[in-house]
Image (cartoon, rainbow, N blue to C red):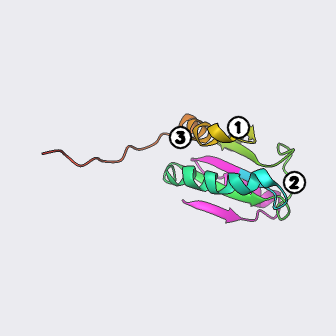
Amino acid sequence: MGLINTVLEDATAYKKALETRRTVFMLFVSPHCPACGAAKPLFSKVAARYRRQAAFYLLDTTQTPRHPDVTGTPTLLILKNGKLVERLKGFGPWETQEQTLNRTFARHTRRVPTKRAKRT
């Protein structure tokens, strides 16, 4: 499953999104949040490396019902078996955001290594 830019309309939709054996990453953003403007493409870039190991949701807080674990944006929720295992409110200083996301994704997924070409 690739990155899903979607709207979860109610509690039933949240529940359905979590009905997976994969780790679920939900990034909540707001269109009026400057930090969210940078968080969305960075999240998409890092998530693309893990697209086979997890499910990803990019959720606009103006179109998605309030989630009790989201008190500001950007907020990344990581869930396993429907249970919250980690929450990142923001990704830290600009200089280390990609590194923070890479470590977070690696901690919660088992990345399948890509095959390298054999040297002759």
Residue plotted at (46% across, 42% down): 111
Whether residue 16 can be seen here:
no
In front of the other: 74 or 25: 74
Q: What secondary structure is marked by label 2? A: loop
Q: Residue 75, labelled with which disc?
A: none
Q: Residue 66, labelled with which disc?
A: 2
Q: Position of residue 5 (x, y in %)?
A: 67, 64
Q: What secondary structure is marked by label 1? A: loop
Q: Residues within 10 Å of mark 1 (few under 14, many from 20)?
A: few
Residue plotted at (58% across, 38% down): 99
Q: Position of residue 39 (x, y in %)?
A: 69, 51
Q: Position of residue 47 (x, y in %)?
A: 56, 51
Write down the quadrant of residue 119 in the picture: top left
Alpha carbons under labels 3 and 1: distance apart: 23 Å
Q: Residues within 10 Å of mark 2 (few under 14, many from 20)?
A: some
> Of label 3 and label 1, which has the lower sequence position?
1
The residue lying furthest to the left in this view is 120
Q: What secondary structure is marked by label 3? A: loop
Amino acid under disc 1: Pro
From the viewer's perspective, is 28 left or right of 109? right
In front of the other: 47 or 42: 42
Amino acid under disc 3: Thr
Q: Residues within 10 Å of mark 3 (few under 14, many from 20)?
A: some
Q: Residue 109, labelled with which disc?
A: 3
Q: Residue 93, labelled with which disc?
A: 1
